[in-house]
Amino acid sequence: MTDTPTTPDAPAVRPGTGGNTAAAPPALEVSGLTVRFAGLTALDKVSFTVEPGSIHAVIGPNGAGKSTCFNVLSGVYRATEGSVRLGPHELTRMAPERIAALGVARTFQNLALSEHSSVADTLMVGRHRLTRTGFLGSGLRLPAARREEARHRERMREIAAFLGLEKYLGFPAGVLPYGLQKLVELGRALCMEPEVLLLDEPIAGMTPEERRHASAVVASVRENLGISVLLVEHDMGVVMRLADTVTVLDFGRKIAEGTPDQVQNDPEVARAYLGSNGDGDPATSFDGGRDGAPDDTGAAS
C-alpha cells in the first residue's frame, strides 16, 4: 500500500466542459487585493492574473501572504480592498460555497481525511455541487437518483484512474501513506469539475518519488484537462519546472512577476526571498524560506 502509483492516461473529457474539450476556463483576475487584520496589513494592493489554461505560481517566504491570498480567493477571508474576478463573476464578497459553484476548487496545506470514509466516498464529496437530485429523491432511491449517482461514480472512477488511485478506492482515506492522501485531496478537488484549481503546497512533506509523481500529475492537470492552476509551493525546483508565470510576495507586497527565469534572476527576489550572503550579495539558489533555509514543513504562509 506504500508504492507510488503511476499516472495513467487522462480522462477523455476535460472536467467542467460538458463534453467540449475545446472550451477554455475563464481568467482569474486579482486586482489591488488588500487584507488587514486589526491594523496588520497581510496583503497590500496585490494584483495578478491567472491566464486560462496556465500554471501560475505564487511564491515567497513564510509570512509573505500566500495563504492569506488563497483564503481570499476561496472565500474564507474577506478582502479589505480590491477585486477578484473569474471571467464575468465578481468573487470578492461571495461565500465559499458560491465560489466553488462557479468552478474554483482548492486543496489545503493540512490534511484532514477521515479514517472511516473510503477513498471512493471521499472523492464523491467533490461531486456534491454537481448533484441535481433532491433530498427526497435520494432518500427514496428513485430511478433518476440512481442513474445520477451511477454517472457521478463513473466519473469519480475516471478521475481516480487519472491520479493512479483506482486500486485504493476501497481503502480508508485517512490511513493511506501521506503522499497518497495528498493525491486523494487533489482528487476530491478535481471531482468538483473546476475551472480553476488552487493548490496550496501540494507536494509538501512528500518523499522524492512522491514529489516526482505529484509534479507530473499537476502538469497533466493543465496539459490534458485544460484546467487553470494557481500554485503555492516552497519547492522552487518544482515551481521553476511547472509554472508559466511566477508572482513573488514579500511581507504582503508583490515584488516581482514574470517567467520562472525572469523571477529567478531578479535581484530584489534574491534579496527578499533568499536572503544574502556574508558579502551582502544575493543568494544564488532557490531552496525555501528566508536566509536560504529549506522550508518543507507546510507551515502557515
Image (spheres, helix red, strand yellow):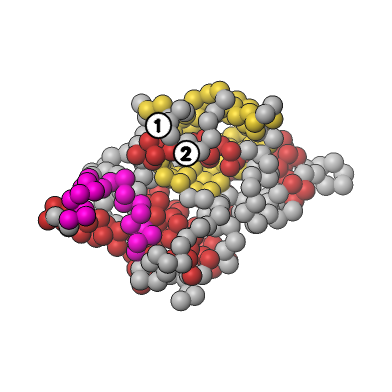
The reply to whether callout 1 and callout 2 are in contact (CB within 8 Å) is: no
- Judge whether residue 127 is colored magenta: yes
In which quarter of the view is residue 158 placed? bottom left
For disc 1, the neighbor class at 10 Å (few under 14, some 14 to 19, many from 20) is many
The x and y percentages for residue 198 are 47, 45
Mark pair 1, 2: CA separation? 11 Å
Of the 4 image quadrants, the one containing the C terminus is top right
* Residue 55 versus residue 42 in the image, above or below: below
Q: Residue at x 52, y 57 (%)?
A: 111
Q: Nearer the viewer, residue 123 or 114?
A: 114
- Main secondary structure along the magenta-highlighted residues: helix
Residue 279, percent across and down?
87, 44
Q: Amino acid at mark 1?
A: Leu
Where residue 74 is drawn, which disc sits there? 2
Residue type indicated by callout 2: Ser
- Look at the image and give the residue range highlighted in magenta: 120-140
Residue sitting at x 20%, y 59% = 150
Q: Label 2: state its secondary structure.
A: loop
Residue 254 among those drawn in magenta: no
Q: Which mark is residue 86?
A: 1
Q: How far from the left and from the top, in percent, is residue 109? A: 56, 52
Decide: is 46 above or below 240.
Answer: above
Q: Earlier in the sequence, mark 1 or mark 2?
A: 2
Label drawn at residue 204:
none
Of marks 1 and 2, the one in the foreground: 2
Q: Is residue 239 visible?
A: no
Could you say where residue 105 lies in the image, as x and y percent from the top left?
A: 41, 45
**Residue 252 appears in the picture as rendered:** yes
Image point 12% across, 56% down: which residue? 143
Q: Residue furthest left?
A: 143
Image vertical order of residue 202 relative to residue 8, above or below: above
| Residue at image coords 28%, 40% | 23
